[in-house]
Image (cartoon, rainbow, N blue to C red):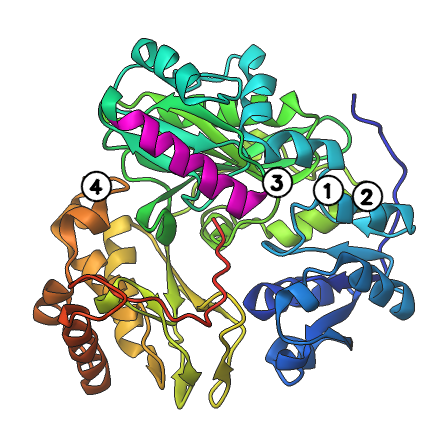
Amino acid sequence: MLEKKTIQPIHKVLIANRGEIALRIMKTVREMGIATVAVYSEADGDAPFARFADEAICIGPPPSSESYLLGDRVIEAALATGADAIHPGYGFLSENAEFSKKARAAGILFIGPSEQAMVTMGSKLAAKDTVKSFDVPLVPGTDYPIHTVEQALEIAPSIGFPLLIKASAGGGGKGMRIVEALNELPSLFDRAVSEAVNSFGDGAVFLERFVTSPRHIEIQILADMHGHVVHLFERECSIQRRHQKVIEEAPSAVLDDALREKMGAAAIEVARSCDYVGAGTVEFLLDADKNFYFLEMNTRLQVEHPVTECITGVDLVYEQVRIAEGHPLSFSQADLEIRGHAIEIRVYAENASTGFLPDTGTLKRYSPPTGPGIRVDDGVEEGQEVSIHYDPMLSKLVVQAATREAAIERSIRAIDAFEVTGVATTLAFGRFALNHPAFRSGDFDTQFVQTHFTPEKLIRDVACSDEELATLAVGLIQQRQPTKSAKPHQPVAPSRWKERRFD
């Protein structure tokens, strides 16, 4: 059961992260009158987030495995600077239960849920087992690990095809395989297990019916230490590449009030199932018949949280800090309402014409748009080097308007006003997607990129700058040239790129 606690005011927060999310958290924390501490790698010493903080301390070399992922160093930095709380942001240590436990043991508040909630929701199997008695819809399949091919072959027919092999500890599409027929199962099972072991150190997989033409809908929740839980409506996250989101919006174009209420209530039950405290996101799959199924829970702030803030007027970081201090929620479910429509375009340093491969270089020009209804969360500036060591997201362009149609038009104008040179970006793809009839009609699913996008369409249909056009053309030429290490039409990933993705 939840333990009610007295108020414990926070005086100084160390942000255990970098880039745009570190800067975004610092801005709210400073508004609350709380001092901030940045930790940074040797590659980030002059980054905007490190300069913005009241104090900054270097914790290691550029590779995240030697800096941002070293929990003990982060805790040492907090103790050395007198920080009484740590905000983990997303990625890195944000869902690391051992790090949270060590921080609390050192007398430092961890702005996030309990270690037990992290462990439970960090395992897809444990999460399914936990929520199944709370009347939360689940995709038909196994709620226990499958250890052998023989076991999988015996169970698969009762689930039906196509089915999905999924890593219990997985994310980002790793350890996941779609099986169309029984004879495909043995080889795909072995590959899924192998990838799960290599990616997560855990080979546990389970079987699940593959939901065709799904939409990815997630519900933002907030829960305090006093038993109050609310949902802040949904986000549509179906525009993805490689199982990673590119464009998000709130609210969804396909949910009506009745379905929204059902999904929100289910998300609250998921939170209650693990005595959740803090900000969290419950993810669902929605099929073509508008049946929804629990997918997983992310026990942290999401990359796409700004669209929820736009349509509700709630600062989620502010609420996270208040909840960690022990305050009850200052509003109820009845106080919340949807105000207009918001769209977020993730601006990645990626070349869409070569399969969204990351790009590196110096930002020769970086000038984000401004104006009514435009918000840009970023952590870069003109002249900055885009490093090989970290996730390639440069910024998030967030636009709000009174209606979905108006938000789309405003987003396109904002993309056109966003100047970035020196590296390829996904801005042109964002313009392509927002202009596509499927997106405008709201009739799309998680296969939007595979169904509708090709580099040729990007060049033909999108009005690009000269530099964008040159980059796309070169990428398309390279994509069509055979290499010794790849078949024709298959791009070769840069060998030095350290890919780290967030949901």
Real-space CA distance between mark 3 and mark 4, rounded to the nearest whole angstrom: 27 Å
Q: Which of the pair 331/26 is nearer the observer?
A: 26
- Residue 46: image quadrant is bottom right
- Asked whether residue 191 is drawn in magenta, I would say yes
Classify 10 Å Cα crowding around label 3: few (below 14), some (14-19), many (20 and above). many
**Residue contact between numbered discs 2 and 1, judged by CB atoms under 8 Å:** yes
| Earlier-in-chain disc, 3 versus 2 | 2
Q: Secondary structure at mark 2?
A: helix
**Does residue 233 appear anywhere in the picture?**
no
Query: At x 40% / y 90%, what residue is drawn?
Result: 364
Disc 3 residue type (three-letter): Thr
From the image, state whether disc 1 or disc 3 is nearer to you: 1
| Earlier-in-chain disc, 3 versus 4 | 3
Disc 4 residue type (three-letter): Phe
Q: Label 2, on which residue?
A: 101
Q: Label 4, on which residue?
A: 444
